[in-house]
């Protein structure tokens, strides 16, 4: 069986980039422009992760991608997209993506 073709993982070309937005790992640029929601930091502390999403992405869309691409291992999975300011390790989210102005970085919690 498996995942449908549009959800099958591709090999990632990670590069380390320290941007002002707090995202340190970016997948290849082609994916950033094609995918509506990208997991950019699979772990932010114990119960959070970071995604880079287009401005009109819904919470349901973000959570679906998170639970498929980076399962949390908890009973409820990733279940909350943080829309208010959260301060983690000196970085505040959500923030506009420094590399793609039409995208925003959100924290997701489980």
Image (cartoon, rainbow, N blue to C red):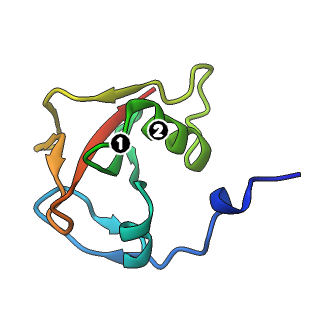
Gap between marks 2 and 1 measured at Cα: 6 Å
Placement of 13 over or under 101, stated as above or below: below
- The residue that appears at 14% across and 46% down in the rendered structure is 95
The numbered mark at residue 11 is none
Secondary element under disc 2, as helix, strand or loop, is helix
Mark 2, Cα crowd under 10 Å, few <14 / some 14-19 / many 20+, is few
On the image, the x and y values in percent for residue 85 come to: 13, 30
In this rendered view, identify the residue nearer to me: 78 or 104: 104
Residue in the image at 27% along x and 29% along y:
82
Residue 10: x and y in percent read: 61, 71
Question: Residue 33, image x and y in percent?
Answer: 36, 69
Q: Give the residue at the far top of this rendering.
A: 76
Image side of residue 22 versus residue 68, left or right = left
- Choose top left, top right, bottom left or bottom right for residue 8: bottom right
Which residue lies under the disc numbered 1?
Answer: 57
- How packed mark 1 is, by other alpha carbons closer than 10 Å (few <14, some 14-19, many 20 or more), is some
Give the percent coordinates (x, y) of residue 66: 50, 42
Query: Would residue 60 appear left or right of 81 to someone viewing this image?
Result: right
Residue 61, label in figure: 2
Q: Residue furthest front?
A: 56
Q: Quadrant of residue 20?
A: bottom left
């Amino acid at each position: 069986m498996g995942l449908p073709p549009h959800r099958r993982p591709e090999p990632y070309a990670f590069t380390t980039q320290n941007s002002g937005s707090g995202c340190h790992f970016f997948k290849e640029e082609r994916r950033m422009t094609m995918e509506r929601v990208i997991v950019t930091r699979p772990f932010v502390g114990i119960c959070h992760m970071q995604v880079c999403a287009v401005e009109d992405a819904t919470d349901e869309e973000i959570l679906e991608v998170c639970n498929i691409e980076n399962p949390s291992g908890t009973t409820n999975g990733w279940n909350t997209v943080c829309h208010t300011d959260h301060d983690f390790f000196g970085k505040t989210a959500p923030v506009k993506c420094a590399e793609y102005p039409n995208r925003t970085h959100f924290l997701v919690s489980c």
